[in-house]
Amino acid sequence: MTLHAALLQGQKLLEDALVSAPRLTAEVLLAHAIGCERSWLFAHSTDELTELWWIHYGRYLHQRLKGVPTQYITGRQEFFGRDFHVTPDVLVPRPETEHLIEAALKYDVETILDIGTGSGAIAVTLALETEARVTATDISAPALQIAKANARHLAALVDFLQCDLGSALRDRSFDLVVSNPPYVAESARVALQAEVRDHEPQLALFAGPDGLEIYRRIIPEAARLLKPGGRLILELGHDSLDPVRGMVAWPWHNIEIVEDLAQIPRVLCAHREDG
């Protein structure tokens, strides 16, 4: 079987199973099975598929058809132009979170705290894109191992701490606190996309009956950890803008909302009062 024929076969299987982006997914999985870039496939489309490549490709297709996210099969996800290692211990970084990075880069700060770092995508990116000293926390030890590995691989200087939110940190140490917290309501579990609900870490997805539990905790925690005049930047969940904005009363002011290209509110920025 040629590589071209293998791609067509994989694409058909994925299409029949209603997997999104079946052609792209087949290309990514075949490239992963071979250990090459996708571009190599097109230059060698008439090459014969070796037995070893076929075994790996078939296994990856089977996993994807069972709902395993492509990123967990390949162990890779691009974020802000860099490749991050991901496993089922961490949430797959989303393009929407890049809006949080862009919002953070507007401020010239010396110290940044990323609460609930997961794969480390936010913390590592900010460490590489700024000259700030970056600290990252997560309650999950396995997630922190992935984050540390990503920091080493990308040569980013980040201090990692295992704790619940910022509980291991002193008061008023940071110029900027950022977070992409869990924000899916337990009531939305059934309606959630199966590959997300069944494969991504529950701890990083769900936040109580209404999805607001972590926001209620993280906002006062940020007020404690920020220096006077510091800033908080939060990623927003679906329909969470109004309740979250209602939580940022005194000592917060200058509330700004960042929307994506579809005019969906994605990020909330708040400035902590001086003093």
Image (tube, rainbow, N blue to C red):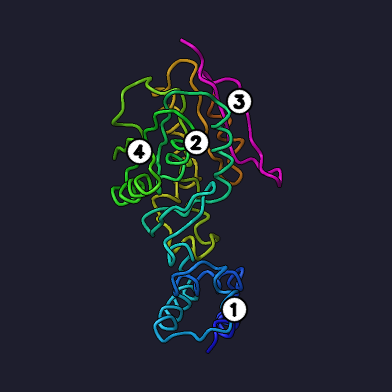
Q: Marks 1 and 3, how far apart in space?
A: 46 Å
Q: Earlier in the sequence, mark 1 or mark 3?
A: 1
The disc at residue 129 is: 2
Residue sitting farthest toward the front: 43
Residue mark closest to the camera, 1 vs 3? 1
Q: Which residue is mark 4?
A: 137
Q: Which residue is mark 1?
A: 11
Q: Marks 2 and 1, how far apart in space?
A: 37 Å
Span shown in magenta: 249-275
Q: Earlier in the sequence, mark 2 or mark 4?
A: 2
Q: Is residue 109 above or below residue 105?
A: above
- Asked if the residue at tag 4 contacts the one at tag 2, i.e. Cβ–Cβ closer than 8 Å, the answer is no
Label 4 amino acid?
Thr
Residue sitting farthest toward the top: 275
- Asked if the residue at tag 4 contacts the one at tag 3, i.e. Cβ–Cβ closer than 8 Å, the answer is no
Residue sitting farthest toward the bottom: 1
**Along the horizontal axis of the image, is 97 left or right of 227?**
right
Q: Which residue is mark 3?
A: 255
**Label 4 SS:** strand
Q: Marks 2 and 4, how far apart in space?
A: 19 Å
Label 1 amino acid?
Gln
Label 2 amino acid?
Glu
- Residue 248 lies within the magenta run: no
How far across and down, in percent of the image, does residue 23 sit? 61, 73
Label 3 amino acid?
Ile
**Label 2 SS:** helix
Viewer-closest of 44 and 117 = 44
Residue mark closest to the camera, 1 vs 4? 1
- Asked if the residue at tag 1 contacts the one at tag 2, i.e. Cβ–Cβ closer than 8 Å, the answer is no
